[in-house]
Amino acid sequence: MHVTLIATHKETEKNSRVWMFRDVSDVEKAEREVRSSGKLLRTLIDHSVNGIIRLSWMAVDEDNEHRELRCIFANAAAGRILDTDPDEMIDGSAETLIKLYTAGMDPDDAEPLLEQFLESTQNGEVLDKEIRAETDGKVRWMRLISEPVGEDVAVTFVDITDSKAKEIKMASAALCDPLTGVLNRRGFENEASHLLSESADDASGALLFIDLNEFKQINDQCGHEIGDQLLTIAAARLKSSFRSHDIIGRPGGDEFVVLVPDVTGEVAEKLAVRLTSALEQPYLIGEETLDCAAAIGLALYPEHAHTLTGLLRAADEAMYRAKARCRGVSNIDQSDLLEKAI
């Protein structure tokens, strides 16, 4: 019985040594894995297409009463984005680096962004902002993400120019009439309402409501393909008759609307007369020569209305009076096609 107990004790001691060696081996293996993971992580960061910098709070006086965020790491992409050697960024202040990042931005946008960044880092908060910058005529969209990592702050710069271009293109498509290229109803109302809301108190302008008188008959007799081409030509004539910043829309069917800002009533009437003449010209489509004059209603801002809804209503009512006057008349005078709001 005594022998058996001794044997068991020796076996236990042997097993303890085995487990000790295993523990040491496991620790060494774990350390190697950590080093390997750290190396892999560093490689991934160094080769990332996103700019990555790490900021740390450092004392700027001997008493450690005042601290400042300074760069302790910057990858190659950060250097490309900020157009600075990454090594030269080390120990640079966060404020200096963000100013480099916002170069090309409108100063009215850059200053508030810098203030937001400094405030978020002081409060240990996450900041996620999109910015638009222009350098040498080239527009660049970037996303700035700042987040606390322990006592430090990690900042990531993401180039979203391509995705933003697609987003803008999709948004533009949603607001444009695909046939004529002018704004659709929603797009026109958005832009026109914004323009009117931003106008000065003494601003003036005009809204024209245009209806192609003979379009329905032409569309029915010649087919939709001819009708579509006629609408496209009419839209092109509208564009050539107005300035680039005038807002042109097609609410639907054979109707168009134009908001003309910063013009007097006299100038607006001259523009409307010129447009009447342009739309009276024959439409040459394939072998067809088609006549499709337009009835135009003119409303002035602020004489007839102060809002877009009011202007549209006044111009629409004027257009229908002109249309009714021309209905069934073979020899239409140009002046009959234009009606001013009451």
Image (tube, rainbow, N blue to C red):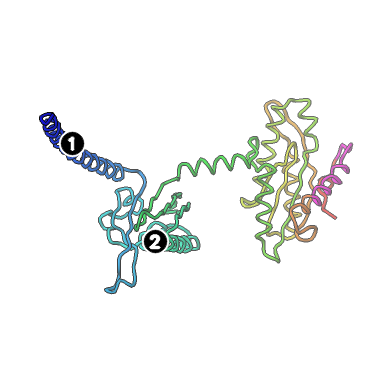
Q: Residue at x 82, y 53 (%)?
A: 340
Tell me the number on the disc at residue 19.
Answer: 1
N-term mark: 2 or 1: 1
47 left or right of 191? left
Q: Quadrant of the N terminus?
A: top left
Question: Picture quarter containing residue 254?
Answer: top right
Give neighbour class at mark 1: few <14, some 14-19, many 20+ (Cα, 10 Å): few
284 left or right of 157? right
Kindly indicate whether the residue at mark 1 contacts the one at mark 2 (C-beta within 8 angstroms). Answer: no
Q: Residue at x 42, y 59 (%)?
A: 124
Return the x and y of residue 280 as percentages of the image width and height.
Answer: 76, 40
Examine the structure image and report whether residue 247 is included in the region drawn in magenta.
no
Return the x and y of residue 312 as percentages of the image width and height.
Answer: 77, 50
Q: Quadrant of the C terminus?
A: bottom right
Give neighbour class at mark 2: few <14, some 14-19, many 20+ (Cα, 10 Å): some
Amino acid type at image mark 1 = Trp
Amino acid type at image mark 2 = Lys
What residue is shown with label 2? 99
Return the x and y of residue 335 as percentages of the image width and height.
Answer: 83, 48
- 200 vs 262, nearest the viewer: 200
Q: CA distance from mark 2 to mark 1?
A: 57 Å
337 left or right of 271? right
Disc 2 is placed on an element classified as helix
Examine the structure image and report whether residue 326 is included in the region drawn in magenta.
yes
Q: Residue at x 37, y 46 (%)?
A: 50
Q: Which residues are magenta?
A: 313-331
For residue 253, above or below residue 187: above
| Camera-side mark, 2 or 1 | 1
Question: Picture quarter containing residue 70?
Answer: bottom left
